[in-house]
Amino acid sequence: MKFYDELKWRGLIKDEAGEDLEEKLNNGGLTFYIGADPSADSLHIGQFPTFLVAERLRRAGHKPIILVGGATGRVGDPRGTKEREKSDEKVVDNNFEKIKAQMKKLFGKETPVLNNYDWFKNYNYVDFLRDVGKYVNVAYMINKDLVKRQMESGISYAEFSYMLMQGYDFKHIFEEYGATLQFGGSDQWGNLTTGIELIRKLNNKEVYAFSVPLTVDSTGKKLGKSEGNALWLDKNKTSSYEMYQYLLNFEDSMIEEYLKKYTFLTKEEIENIMKEQNEHPETRIAQKTLAKEVITFIHDEDSYNSAVKISEALFSGNIKDLSEEELKDAMSGVDTYTIDTELNLVDTLVSTGILSSKREAREFITNGSISVNGEKITDLEYLVNKSNALYNKYIVIRRGKKKYYLVTIKEE
C-alpha cells in the first residue's frame, strides 16, 4: 500500500483539502504541523491516534512541527455545546511546558515545538483585524459546524474569534517555517480550512489539510477528558498498569479499528491477530497486542513488562512478589484507608467502611471472601499490623473476586 492508501485503510483521513494531496503524501518531503491544546498538562488516550499520525508522516519522509496553543489556549475553541471556563494564564504556561516535554519524548528531541503565544502576545488588535479579520467572512465562520451548534446555547466573541487565530497560525507557520500541510481532529475542520483560505488570499499559494476522525467507542462516545473517562499519556497521571487494564478491556467490536489507529502493525499482522482473536476470543490476543504496542511506544518496554507483572500478580494472588513501586501502581485508583493502631481483621473491615457491620465482616471472612496481601483469611482474630504488612506499611484487602482496598498503617 502507498502511504495515502494506508492512512485511508487505517481510518485516519476524514476530510481533505488541496489539489494532489494524495500524491504529496505519497511522495514525502512536506513540512506539516499539528496543534495541541494546553487545557491540560498531558495528552490523553483519545487524542493519541491523531498525534500518532504525526509520527506516521515523519516515518513517511515528511517533516513535523508541533504547535502548542499558548495563545489560543487562553481563549478556548468552541465545543459545539457551551462556553469554556476562562483559563488561568499561569496554568496555560505550565501546561505548555509539560506538553512540550511530552511531545519531545514521543516524537524526538529534534521535533520543533512552537508556542503561538510567541507571535500573538505583541500583535496589535487593530492590526490583527486589518491583517486577518478583513479576509474571513462572518457567514463563512457561522456556517462551521461547532460554531453553528454553539450558537444555540450562546457563544462569546472570544471563542467565535478562535477560528481567526488558528487560521493565522497556519499562515505564520507557512511563512516562517515553510509548512504546507496541517492536520487535526475532525472537530477542527473549520479551523483548518480557515488557514487554507487565508494563505490562498494573502500569499496566493496552495496548501493542504486533512482531518482525522475522532476516536470513539461503540456507542459513539469520545475517548477524551471532556467525557470524564480520560486516560492520560503521562505515566505520573496514569500508570502503565492502569493503561494496561484500560486497553485490555477495549470492546471486541472496536478492537480491529483500534489496532489500525493506535499501532504501527502492518495490515497482514493485524489480519493475523484478528483471525486468532475471532477463533479464540477468550485469549484477548488483540487487546493484549494493543496494550503492548501502545504502552511500549508511550512509556517504554520496562513499563509494559511491569504492567503485565502487576496484572498477573493480582490475578494469581502473588501480591508479595511486587516491588513497592509496583504495588503502589497496582493500587492506584482503589479506595485507600489509614489505620494508626493494631486491629483484628473484623474491626479493620468495619472501621474503614469496607464492610458495614461486624456481623457482615464475620460472614465474609468465614465464607472465604476476604484475602489479605493475596492470602485468603478465615481467622476472625487475624491481626492487621506492621508485622504482616507489605513493606511494613501496606495491607491489600480483596473482597470477593475483584474489589480491592488498600489499608496503610500510619507511621509512628
Image (tube, grey):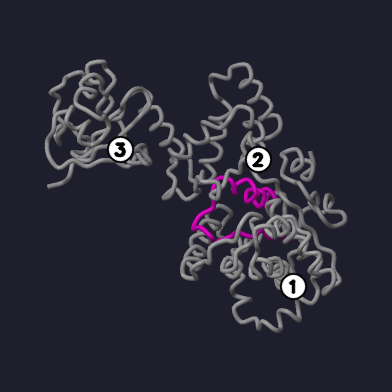
How many discs appear?
A: 3
Please name the residue that numbered disc 2 is placed on.
Answer: 261
Disc sitting over residue 175 in the figure: 1
Nearer the viewer's eye, disc 3 or disc 2? 2
- Kindly state the secondary structure of the residue where label 1 is placed: helix
As for residue 285 lying within the magenta part, the answer is: no
Q: Magenta region: which residues?
A: 30-59
Q: Nearer the viewer, residue 35 or 295?
A: 35
- Give the amino acid type for the residue marked by disc 3 in the picture: Ser
Relative to 83, say whether 372 is above or below: above
Q: Nearer the viewer, residue 93 or 370?
A: 370
The reply to whether dot 3 and dot 2 touch (C-beta < 8 Å) is: no
Please name the residue that numbered disc 3 is placed on.
Answer: 323
- Counting other residues with Cα less than 10 Å from the Cα at mark 2, is it few (<14), some (14-19), or many (20 or more)? many
- Give the amino acid type for the residue marked by disc 2 in the picture: Lys
Where does residue 277 sit, x and y in percent of width and height?
61, 22
Q: Nearer the viewer, residue 135 or 294?
A: 135
Residue located at (22% from left, 42% from top): 338
- Give the amino acid type for the residue marked by disc 1 in the picture: Glu
> Alpha-carbon distance for marks 1 and 3?
53 Å
Q: Which of the two discs, 1 and 3, labels the residue nearer the N terminus? A: 1
Q: Which of the two discs, 1 and 2, labels the residue nearer the N terminus? A: 1
Where does residue 323 sit, x and y in percent of width and height?
30, 37
On screen, residue 339 versus residue 50, left or right, reads left
Q: Which of the two discs, 3 and 2, labels the residue nearer the N terminus? A: 2
